[in-house]
Amino acid sequence: MSFVVSLLVISFLIFFHELGHFLAARLMGVRVDVFSIGFGKKLISKKFGDTQWSISAIPLGGYVQMKGQDDSDPTKVSYDDDSYTIKTPIQKIFILLAGPFANFLLAFLLYFTMANIGIPKTLAVVGGFSETSVAKEVGLLKGDKIIQIDNQRVYYWDDIGEIIQKSDNKMHFVIQRDLKLLDFDIQAKVMSVKNLFGEDIERKLIGIGASGETEVVYYGIIDGLGYAVDKTIWATTYIFQSVQKLISGAVGLDQLGGIITIVDVTAQASNMGILALLGFMAIISINLGVLNLLPIPALDGGHIMFNLYEMITKKAPSDIAMYRFTIAGWIMLFGLMFIGLYNDINRLIG
């Protein structure tokens, strides 16, 4: 059952991406010959209007094949009025950007839905101390609720770290204990810790851990929009940083996951409840958007690069150049897929 859920989730995300391309193409007057979820042999196929809508055998992606545009053979062009070929570079870029934009929009909608379902937030209650805790040294106890730091109101556990990093090392804490308010001055320590990418960074720490107590926060429409914007920006920034660190070598290729990892984590998220599943879907959707913007031939970003070249030089790349770059792009993509699959198998064996 989990595998079926994973397959449905991945297919839905791909459908939304391709739907962006489809709608933008139709808006620009381009005929769409094929709209396919998956590659290879068509399992289900039905024609509506000019478009053949299909579900294909290999659920590792999807494609919208427009008239006069074919990634499998970029030399196939058409100069009819409803062809992609004759559109201006700006119109083509609009069509190409529509797919990634659809992914970012979907992530925003998923985060907005989560905000209105209700987000569990960890309360600012002390649950433990590190061995070198300065908070414990000055007298904080388990169960203490942090109310203020340097006159800034603390509502949830996430607030504590944000305020500490922005404050001076010495801070004034107001603590609630047994219905009493107590004051403590705490001098934070600057220590080296690992960030999300496994890199050593310096952070101000006072050596406390959360109790794990939570409450559900319902954001409503206005606050929910703000939450969705913030989460979409955070996830997009994080994924762009991940790609940059992968390219620079700061993060090794052994950290790259493939389709098995995606299916496995999607299954785990679905078993953890609707919020976890929606959050993971948002992350994967943004991943699709970001990765498709990379300047790799055969991806949207590669086609955008070709059109920018045409805008600057006032001439399109030659058919042979397009063909060679596209083949190189497919080789690169299959190489990355192979590395991801190899890593997945290693993790399964491990």
Image (cartoon, grey):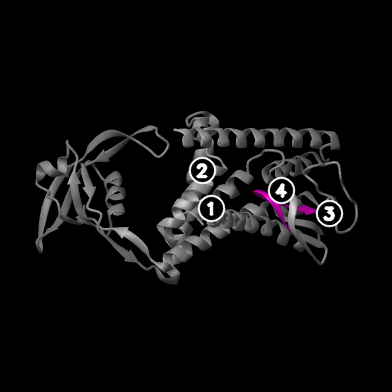
For marks 2 and 1, give the CA distance: 12 Å
On residue 39, which mark appears?
Answer: 4
On residue 67, which mark appears?
Answer: 3
- Mark 1: secondary structure: helix
Q: Nearer the viewer, mark 2 or mark 1?
A: 1
Residue at image point 10% right, 41% down: 137
Say whether residue 74 is left or right of residue 13.
right
**Residue carrying label 1:** 3
Magenta stretch, residue numbers: 54-67
For marks 3 and 4, give the CA distance: 18 Å
Q: Nearer the viewer, mark 3 or mark 1?
A: 1
For marks 1 and 4, give the CA distance: 19 Å
**Residue carrying label 2:** 261
Residue type pointed to by label 1: Phe
The percent coordinates of residue 246 (x first, y second) are 52, 33
Residue type pointed to by label 2: Thr
